[in-house]
Image: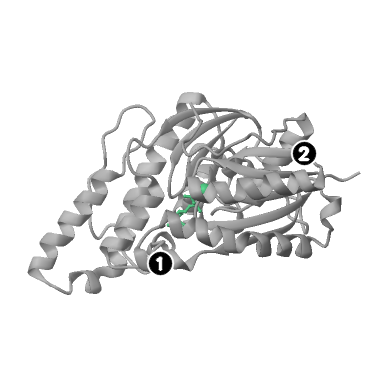
Amino acid sequence: MSTYILGIESSCDDTSAAVLQDDTILANVIANQDVHMKFGGVVPELASRSHQQNIIPVIHRALHDANISKKQLNAIAFTRGPGLMGSLLVGTSFAKAFAMGLNIPLIEVDHMQAHILAHFVQLKEQRKPVPKFPFLCLTVSGGHTQIVKVDDYFKMTLLGETIDDAAGEAFDKTAKIMGLNYPGGPLIDKLAKQGNPKAFKFPMPQIKDLDYSFSGIKTSFLYFLRDQLKLNEHFIEENKADLAASMQYTIIEILMKKLVKAAKQEGIKEIAIAGGVSANSGLREAIKKGEKKYGWNTYIPDFQFTTDNAAMIAITGLFKYQKGLFTNQNTTPYTRSIFK
Ligand code: KG4
Ligand code: ZN
């Protein structure tokens, strides 16, 4: 008999609901919130208000797309954290009430663990290979940059992480400095395709072990542009593509350097990437090149599973369901990463 899990994600600015039949996705609905665009970043109060408006239609749509009734659901999985408190509360409260109403188990999911486990979601049309344990995952999003050793679905060890900005923030801030909209990552990616990655050089951070830092390049980019704009007020406009390509190249160099170091240190050749920045075409290419260069087997998620989505919450929910790892109605969200 199949297991049907409803996943609910509301940690930041995307409201998402997904339905899985075992490990196969039946529906994955995502409502983005355009309201933040003009502010150049996510406004927490507006995010939670939008979640409240979106959550019922998004869940309704997911059940409709999956072509199942709510009575067929075996469990409800929701993001407990990390994320924005007001946003998390909407998903958490809804999940609690819905599970209680249907009298089915409630399962709490860690958002960062879920980004990694997104690799185990299968599409209806065709099954794909999944990473073999132990594997390394570079999780790169708007809020986090982590290298995680994954020994099992629930045995994950943090090997390194950013000490300041996340990689996604580096992309978004680069875009903001250039006068582009939020989120800037996809816009930089698009511009970079027409630019020369070696046109401008930015300093690489010197951070110990497997940790990262992205605040230095942001500052040097800002000062570099300030100096250039004094000489030519059209500098950004005239060099848009080269600036995007050079910054993207630098961010990817920084990410890859520590990932290669971690793979050597751990003696692991199963390499995955996850999170919003794993949608970046330059990063996807760089990881893929690791197959020839270092003998890696690489796992690059489908675009729909890179940025925040509820399919990753549902698959994590499925693995917990199989182990009977349920939560109760007293659960409350947490805002900070629980990875140690
Ligand atoms: O995982 P995610 O959707 O949300 C968080 O949990 O943070 O990641 C969002 C981040 C944003 O910083 C966005 O600019 C970045 O992922 N992003 C990209 C691309 N697509 C999304 N960064 C670079 N290139 C992309 N194509
Ligand atoms: Zn995320």
What whole-number distance in Å separates the C-alpha atoms at marks 2 and 1? 37 Å
Disc sitting over residue 173 in the figure: none
Can residue 2 be seen here? The reply is yes
| Amino acid identity at mark 2 | Pro
Is residue 133 positioned above or below 185 on the image? Answer: above
Does dot 2 land on a helix, a strand or a loop?
A: loop
Can residue 288 be seen here? The reply is no
Whole-percent x, y for residue 258 in the image: 39, 35
Whole-percent x, y for residue 71 in the image: 85, 52
User: As drawn, is 283 to the left or to the right of 239?
Assistant: right
Q: Residue furthest right?
A: 1
Q: How many marks?
A: 2
- Residue at 26% x, 51% y: name it: 218
Q: Which of the 4 quarters of the picture holds residue 235?
A: bottom left
Q: Which of the 4 quarters of the picture holds residue 16?
A: bottom right
Does dot 1 land on a helix, a strand or a loop?
A: helix
Q: Which of the 4 quarters of the picture holds residue 324?
A: top right
| Amino acid identity at mark 1 | Met
User: As drawn, is 220 to the left or to the right of 36?
Assistant: left
Whole-percent x, y for residue 265 in the image: 45, 25
Q: Residue furthest left?
A: 231
Comes first in the chain, label 2 or label 1 = 1
Dots 2, 1 in contact, CB < 8 A:
no
User: Which residue is tagged 2?
Assistant: 105
Q: Which is more toward the observer, 194 or 15?
A: 15
User: As drawn, is 335 to the left or to the right of 316?
Assistant: left
Whole-percent x, y for residue 188 in the image: 37, 63
Disc sitting over residue 37 in the figure: 1
- Residue at 50% x, 64% y: name it: 33
- Residue at 34% x, 51% y: name it: 170
- The quadrant in which the N terminus is found is top right
